[in-house]
Image (cartoon, helix red, strand yellow):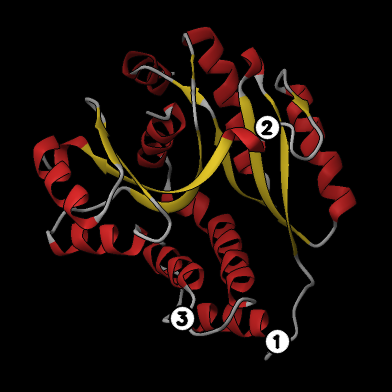
Amino acid sequence: MSGHSKWSTIKHKKAALDARRGKAWSKLGRAVTMAAKLGGNPNDNPRLRLAIEKAKADNMPKDTIEKAIKKGTGELAGESYEEILYEGYGPGGVAVMAKVVTDNRNRTAGEIRKIFERSGGNLGAAGCVSFQFSSKGVIIVSADKASEDRIMEIALEAGADDVSSSELIHDVRCSPTSFDKVKRDLDLAGIETESADLSMVAASEIKLDLASARKVMKLIDALEEHDDVEAVYTNSDIPDDVVAQLAKE
């Protein structure tokens, strides 16, 4: 189970909403705009539908979402953004990918490189780690929201590939094409999800001890704080006891 998923759940619960809202809305708005470039009707565009759901979940105003869609479809003028995947290695040889949406490729590349270097990692060439990952739907449910048996019953019936559980979370994995149904069936069952997204999942993971996990999470946090970074993916595996220790720091 991805240690990043567990850490993100803990960090989300610790975060102050007001402190993160401005930056979050900016990133969510760009995600909506980029998705809308593939078509402005969310019924026909699963990526846009997911981006809108995430924006609404963060209480982004309806008119702000609509403006972001129109920027993507070209109905409104806006910045010229491009989506880039930066790849590299973190401390301990952990593979790291950062999905970026930027209006200045050169500026962002330099800043991302510095983040890697300051955190004990190094930015690599395109393709250096992405071959280890595949696209998956990843749905995270807090362990206190439902039993493992209940999650497995609903998710596997809906088409999920796998469910793994720990003391902290249930981690549901599925194909991108099954994502909508799995998420919808969990919602219909009244099971609240901590997060639900299309992600890049590693075929194998590197288990980290506390010292290594601390360094890797420092890199992930720094990347996620960058204004242009939309998502970070790693092949790290952090045991529950290490995640619990990190949460106390």
Category of crowding for the residue at label 3, using alpha-carbon neighbours closer than 10 angstroms: few (below 14), some (14–19), many (at least 20): few
Q: Which mark lies nearer to you, 1 or 2? A: 2
The reply to whether callout 1 and callout 2 are in contact (CB within 8 Å) is no
Q: Would residue 206 be seen by someone viewing this image from the given angle?
A: yes
Which quadrant of the structure image shows residue 120?
Answer: top right
| Residue furthest right in the image | 106
- Assign a secondary structure to mark 2: loop
Q: Is residue 184 above or below residue 170?
A: below
Residue drawn at x 28%, y 63% is 181
- Assign a secondary structure to mark 1: loop
Between disc 3 and disc 1, whose residue precedes? 3
Q: Which amino acid type corresponds to the residue marked 2 in the rendered image? A: Val
Q: Where does label 2 land, which residue?
A: 129
On residue 63, the disc is none
Category of crowding for the residue at label 1, using alpha-carbon neighbours closer than 10 angstroms: few (below 14), some (14–19), many (at least 20): some
Q: CA distance from mark 3 to mark 1?
A: 18 Å
Q: Position of residue 139 (x, y in %)?
A: 33, 48
Q: Where does label 1 land, which residue?
A: 74
Left or right for 138, reference 119: left
Left or right for 35, reference 196: right
Q: Where does label 3 land, which residue?
A: 44
Between disc 1 and disc 2, whose residue precedes? 1
Q: Quadrant of the C terminus?
A: top left
Left or right for 105, reference 165: right
Residue drawn at x 29%, y 39% is 162
Q: Which amino acid type corresponds to the residue marked 3 in the rendered image? A: Asp
Q: Which amino acid type corresponds to the residue marked 1 in the rendered image? A: Gly
Q: CA distance from mark 2 to mark 3?
A: 32 Å
* Camera-side residue of 198 and 110: 198
Residue drawn at x 40%, y 61% is 177
